[in-house]
Image (cartoon, grey):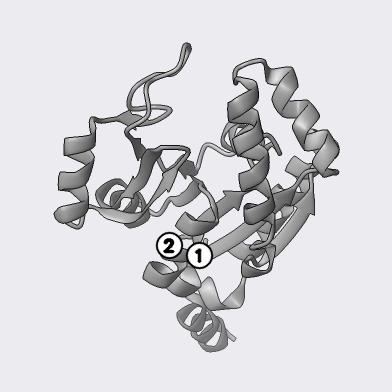
Amino acid sequence: MLKRRGILFVISSPSGAGKSTIARMLLKSDPTLAMSVSATTRPIRPGEVDGKDYNFVDLDTFKQMVADGDFLEWAHVFGHRYGTPKKPVYDNLAAGRDILFDIDWQGAQQLFQQAGGDVVRTFIFPPSIEELEARLRKRGTDSDEVIDARMARAASEISHWDGYDYVLVNEVAQDCFEGVKNILDAERHKRSRQTGLIGFVRGMSKAG
């Protein structure tokens, strides 16, 4: 196989539009893909596993990580802080694995500033604002006040869609997943990522 640079593959969407579901489907379908596990100051939720879903840390620890330059990106979201630790990302890239990021537009922007051409950004729209609110209420995990805050934030997040390389509408999760998977496959085969291509072609020329 040709050698290539790893991909930092970002999926963003308003809360409730399905990015976490699509991310889980991608990970299940592709064992070579590694998930970037964010650090967060928010409390752990039922069913979540520390170190798998998030690295749960207190505020003082998070602030120290920021001061030490341990994050590729970080942001305030709904009163809590979230950040992507550098070391696990770099370790996975060194091992030849692509990294999947489930982050918002602020994180995507910061990551792109850090890693440029190795970042691929995909934004997922809900079918409509009305459907987005219906999905949030159907989850039954948030109060009306929190849902109102999420809806207000959704408008801001959607306004940043043009900062992404690809956009999809998540009307049917399976269809959206197939679209995201096709994007990842195409990006993996881009000529610009094939670091071993020149040597491979030269070897074929000599063989001829």
Residue nearer the viewer, 37 or 188: 37
- Residue 183 horizontal/vertical position (percent): 69, 57
Could you tell me how far apart the alpha carbons at marks 2 and 1 are, in whole angstroms? 7 Å
- Residue 16 horizontal/vertical position (percent): 68, 34
Task: Judge whether residue 2 can be spotted in this image.
Answer: no
Q: Residues within 10 Å of mark 2 (few under 14, many from 20)?
A: many
Residue nearer the viewer, 56 or 159: 159
Q: Tags 2 and 1 in contact by the CB under 8 Å rule? A: yes
Q: On the rendered structure, is 70 left or right of 172?
A: left
Residue type of the residue flagged with mark 1: Val
- Mark 2 or 1, which is nearer the eye? 2
Q: Quadrant of residue 190?
A: bottom right
Instruction: Tell me the SS state at disc 2.
Output: helix
Task: Judge whether residue 33 can be spotted in this image.
Answer: yes
Q: On the rendered structure, is 12 left or right of 75?
A: right
Give the mark nearest the N terminus, 2 or 1: 2
- Residue 49 horizontal/vertical position (percent): 39, 19
Q: Residue at x 51, y 88 (%)?
A: 206
- Residue 150 horizontal/vertical position (percent): 62, 37
Disc 2 marks which residue? Answer: 111
Q: Residue at x 60, y 86 (%)?
A: 208
Q: On the rendered structure, is 17 left or right of 206?
A: right
Residue nearer the viewer, 105 or 177: 105
Q: On the rendered structure, is 29 left or right of 134?
A: left
Residue type of the residue flagged with mark 2: Leu
Disc 1 marks which residue? Answer: 119
Instruction: Tell me the SS state at disc 1.
Output: strand
Q: Determine whether 26 is above or below 123 in the image.
A: above
